[in-house]
Image (cartoon, grey):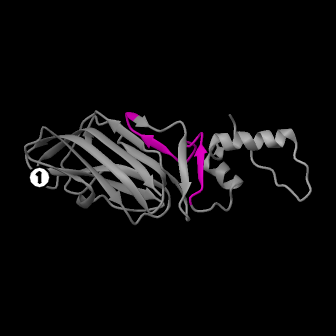
Amino acid sequence: MAWTDPNTYIAGAILTAAQLNAMQANALAGGPIYTTLAALNTAIPSPFEGQRAYLTAPAVGTVTAAGADTAVPVGISVIYNGTAWVCTTPVGSRTDASGTTTSAAYTATLSGTPGTNPSVTTLTGATALVMIATGQFAGGGSGAMSFAVSGATTVAASTNYGVQTSSAGGSDYARTFVLTGLTAGVNTFTLQYNAAGGGTQTFARRNITVQGIA
């Protein structure tokens, strides 16, 4: 079932069977359906708060992910929060490849053969739900994994939004954060790592999932 943009009617107009059938099909579809955010913005230039839509091709410049395995939905649900369209469908990325760092400062670059660093790009409002997890094997000292935000918002990686890894190593760590203060729009969340407690820190089984909160 396809979405049909509604007609503009004038007083006294006689509705045809095709027009009525199109309105019925739209009602059964549950809301407007478009391919991309650009198509949505063209069709609905003045959305109202709480308006919903579905995008069938969100990966066209709006919702993407990088990593060994990515969870970018074929289609996404979006809701207008009064300021911006927000993706309420979770988007994720992961890799099992391990990499090491001795950097005391956060870095997105790991040594060894870590593969593509996991990241997620999605539509957010001022708030997002971010879930991160890693398996860590310490070589003495301790470290942390966090994430940085770029795009509409610039947020540096921070231990306030990270998982602390211990000197013992051999453990899995996971945390979920409600991240506020974002600038609404297309934001990219990228995993970053440090060995602030010294030693060579090894990170594996790295995961990040992001969901916009309208």
The kind of residue tagged 1 is: Gly
Image point 34% across, 44% down: which residue? 208
Instruction: Give percent across and percent down for residue 30.
Output: 62, 44
**The magenta stretch spans residue 63:** yes
Residue 195 magenta: no
29 displayed left or right of 6: left
Majority secondary structure of magenta residues: loop
Residue 152 vs residue 30, the one in the foreground = 30
Name the residue carrying label 1: 198
Q: Where residue 51 appears, x then y in whole percent?
A: 60, 56
Residue 139 visible in this rendered orientation of the protein: yes
Residue 178 location in percent, x, y? 34, 58
Bin the neighbour count of mark 1 within 10 Å (Cα to Cα): few under 14, some 14-19, many 20 and up.
some
Query: Of residues 73 and 108, which is closer to you in this image?
Result: 73
User: Where, quadrant-wise, is the N terminus in this rendering?
Assistant: top right
Q: Can the viewer see residue 109 in this picture?
A: no
Q: Which residues are magenta?
A: 50-69
Looking at the picture, how far across and down is residue 148, in whole percent? 35, 56
Which image quarter: residue 213? bottom left
* 12 to the left or right of 31: right
Q: Quadrant of residue 205?
A: top left
As rendered, which of 14 and 47 lies closer to the eye?
14
Residue at x 40% of width, y 66% of height: 181
What residue is rendered at 18% in x and 49% in y? Answer: 102
Q: Residue at x 80, y 42 (%)?
A: 20
